[in-house]
Image: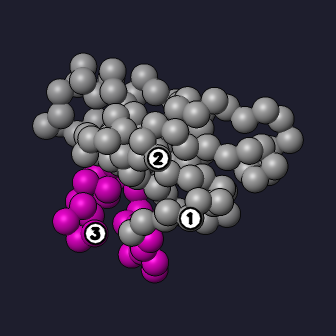
Amino acid sequence: LRYHAPALQAAGLDQPRPPRALVVANWVADGAFTPGIGSFGAPPHRRGVPVTPDPPGTDALRRDIRKPSAEHDVFIVNQDYGYQSGWAAGSLIMAEKVLQHLGLPCPTWLNASWYQTHVADHV
């Protein structure tokens, strides 16, 4: 976190608290969001949604997975839930979506048109 402190301060953001817990993997088949290459999701009653859920692989469902709790600062970035399932780039795009959510701009070293297409244009 010390490495990112100057960039966060320059963006007007407080330095985040260190994480208190980390989940490396969750392969619980009956979980609210089950991982799988491009086939995640849960029935509406499992997600607390009284309507038909978004189809698997939609931006809205990815947004819900990236920040699954409104009560906690928990974020999920993983290729299984991302935009390029099965590839490390999927995890990196999900990480950029979280950073975008936190108010950080496109990194200066990243191609702006690629960022727009693969990160900013998604929900």
Judge by depth and name the residue closer to the eye, 18 or 29: 29
Amino acid residing under circle 1: Val
Q: What element carries label 1?
A: loop
Which residue is labeled 3 in the image?
Answer: 1
| Horizontal and vertical percent position of residue 62 | 53, 39
Q: Which residue lies furthest to the right in this view?
A: 50
Which residue is labeled 2 in the image?
Answer: 36
- 26 vs 92: above or below: below
Which residue shows up at 46% across the image and 47% down it? 36
- The crowding category of the residue bearing disc 2, from other C-alpha atoms within 10 Å (few below 14, some 14 to 19, many at least 20), is some
Distance of mark 1 from mark 2, alpha carbons? Answer: 11 Å
Amino acid residing under circle 3: Leu
Q: Residue 71, located in which quarter of the rendered image?
A: bottom right
**Main secondary structure type of the part rendered in magenta:** loop
What's the magenta region? 1-23
Q: Can residue 100 be seen in this view?
A: no
Which residue is labeled 1 in the image?
Answer: 28
